[in-house]
Image: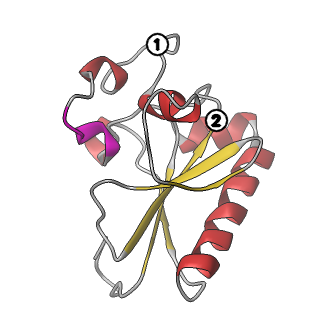
Amino acid sequence: MIAHAPGIDPAYTKGMSSSAPSIFSKIVSREIPADIVMENDRLIALRDIAPKAPVHLLVVPKTQQYANVAELAADDPQLLAELVAMAQELASEHANGEFRLVFNSGETAGQTVFHVHAHVLTGGLDEGSLAG
């Protein structure tokens, strides 16, 4: 995942405060380069730098107001619906339209960047596997 990239300050990942810009906020503001594949007013999608499937994209709200998907669902269900719609659009554009959508919520669940984001995985995934 992006948080493991060399040279990324750990302050942008584990235990970050809501006032410190996340790595995703720095990508949105173009302070950090990324392979951006889609963008609109509220969301940005990019390739994961450590892919776990033939197609592994991240869909990220431009606001870092929400640390995880539960917060997003409770406070802005419309933005969550837009995120899922973008995931579907990306899967259609980059694969056959079928996809796995994963949200890691919490450190022990594998979340390393506490700025809500979805992993869109597709391309040769088997049932019973979490990723490729």
Most common SS among magenta residues: helix
Amino acid type, mark 2: Lys
Q: Please give the residue where the numbered disc 1 appears in the rendered image.
A: 20
Quadrant showing the C terminus: bottom left
**Residue 62 disc label:** 2
Percent across and percent down for residue 68 are 51, 38
Is residue 50 among the parts visible in the rendering? yes
Q: Is residue 33 magenta?
A: no
Q: Is residue 28 left or right of residue 55?
A: right
Q: Residues within 10 Å of mark 2 (few under 14, many from 20)?
A: many
Q: Is residue 27 left or right of residue 14?
A: right
- Say which of 6 and 104 sits in front: 6
Q: Residues within 10 Å of mark 1 (few under 14, many from 20)?
A: few
Which region is colored magenta? 2-6
Amino acid type, mark 1: Ala
The image's colour scheme reads secondary structure
Is residue 67 among the parts visible in the rendering? no
Which residue is found at the position 50% from the left and 35% from the top? Answer: 27
